[in-house]
């Protein structure tokens, strides 16, 4: 569980719970913590590892999007390190409380052994928001924050550390499982969003996904292609008049179909559907 340095003063803690990545970027002014984990208890585990790392104190937090496994440690880090600014997109910050309360309600009846932690956590949204780009100045280096478009959520951001060619992608990219297409995802827009992310990468870039091992540009290209196949297939099925409840059984998919129900639902709510017609004599 300790932080691993993947580039000069860029560390990643790959936590067993959710196989989640918490990233830290160091500079002469302190540390930026990217994503804070899924509960106050998990955040205290992150803080313990930060203290073992012993490379300075956090001066800022970044949430890559609003989901609880990336934001529920916010309040705990603020209590440990005074009043840190929390950076996120406008959309993510606006949705953090409602998204968090919804997951807490779901966990009230869950048999997950860590459910009580999630329910007991205080939700704290970001207070430094932006719509397109922002920069955190660490003195001798900068952390660039970019909202490349909608994909996993409506408010995804990526954090770029340009001097070492590292990009922290949040759940726009996942390595240990197929991309999570949820009820708040944008499957038709996700490939174009990743096209913009690819524009921030070089052939040598290291990419930290939201979950799983650090990957390279080629992995991002391949996942982008798979998501594009999903989007194009959904457009084709809708244009052919295939009913929504028959879509998953009517095509080949790059991901397991049990993870694509929300993709179909979200896409069909946005796409015009043709009506099946008898052939004219």
Image (cartoon, rainbow, N blue to C red):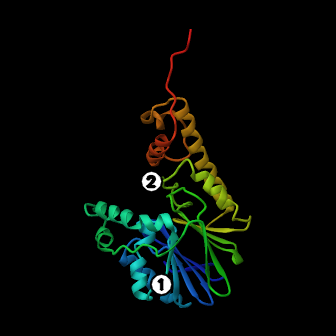
User: Alpha-carbon distance for marks 1 and 2?
Assistant: 30 Å
According to the picture, the residue beneath numbered tag 2 turns out to be 182
Provide residue 6's location: percent of width, then percent of height: 63, 76
Q: Quadrant of residue 73?
A: bottom left
* Rendering coords of residue 196 (x, y %): 66, 59
Quick one: which residue is furthest to the left in this view? 109
Q: Residue furthest top?
A: 281
Count of marks overlaid on the render: 2
Mark 1 = which residue? 84
Could you tell me if residue 65 is visible in this image?
Answer: no
- Looking at the picture, does residue 218 appear above or below residue 253? below
Compare residues 237 and 16 and report the one nearer the observer. 237
Residue at 47% x, 84% y is: 84
First of labels 1, 2 by sequence position? 1
* Label 2: which secondary element: loop
Residue neighbourhood size for the residue with mark 1, other residues' Cα within 10 Å, grouped as few (<14), some (14–19), many (≥20): some
At horizontal 63% and vertical 52% (from top left) the residue drawn is 192
User: Which quarter of the figure is the C terminus placed in?
Assistant: top right
């Amino acid at each position: 569980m300790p932080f691993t340095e993947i580039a000069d003063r860029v560390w990643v803690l790959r936590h067993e719970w959710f196989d989640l990545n918490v990233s830290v970027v160091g500079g002469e002014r302190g540390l930026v913590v990217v994503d804070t984990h899924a509960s106050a208890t998990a955040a205290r585990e992150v803080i313990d590892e930060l203290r073992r790392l012993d490379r300075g104190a956090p001066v800022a937090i970044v949430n890559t999007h609003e989901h609880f496994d990336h934001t529920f440690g916010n309040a705990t880090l603020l209590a440990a390190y005074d009043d840190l600014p929390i950076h996120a997109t406008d959309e993510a910050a606006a949705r953090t409380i409602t998204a968090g309360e919804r997951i807490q309600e779901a966990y009230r009846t869950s048999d997950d052994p860590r459910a009580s932690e999630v329910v007991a956590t205080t939700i704290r949204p970001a207070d430094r928001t932006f719509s397109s780009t922002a920069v955190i100045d660490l003195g001798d280096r900068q952390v660039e924050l970019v909202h490349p478009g909608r994909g996993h959520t409506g408010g995804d951001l990526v954090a770029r550390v340009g001097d070492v060619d590292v990009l922290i992608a949040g759940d726009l990219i996942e390595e240990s499982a197929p991309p999570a297409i949820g009820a708040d995802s944008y499957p038709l827009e996700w490939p174009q969003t990743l096209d913009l992310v690819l524009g921030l990468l070089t052939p040598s870039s290291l990419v930290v996904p939201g979950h799983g091992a650090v990957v390279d540009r080629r992995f991002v290209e391949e996942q982008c292609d798979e998501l594009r196949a999903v989007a194009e297939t959904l457009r084709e099925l809708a244009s052919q008049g295939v009913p929504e409840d028959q879509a998953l059984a009517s095509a080949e998919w790059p991901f397991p179909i049990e993870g694509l129900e929300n993709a179909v639902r979200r896409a069909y709510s946005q796409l015009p559907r043709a009506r099946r017609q008898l052939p004219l004599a």
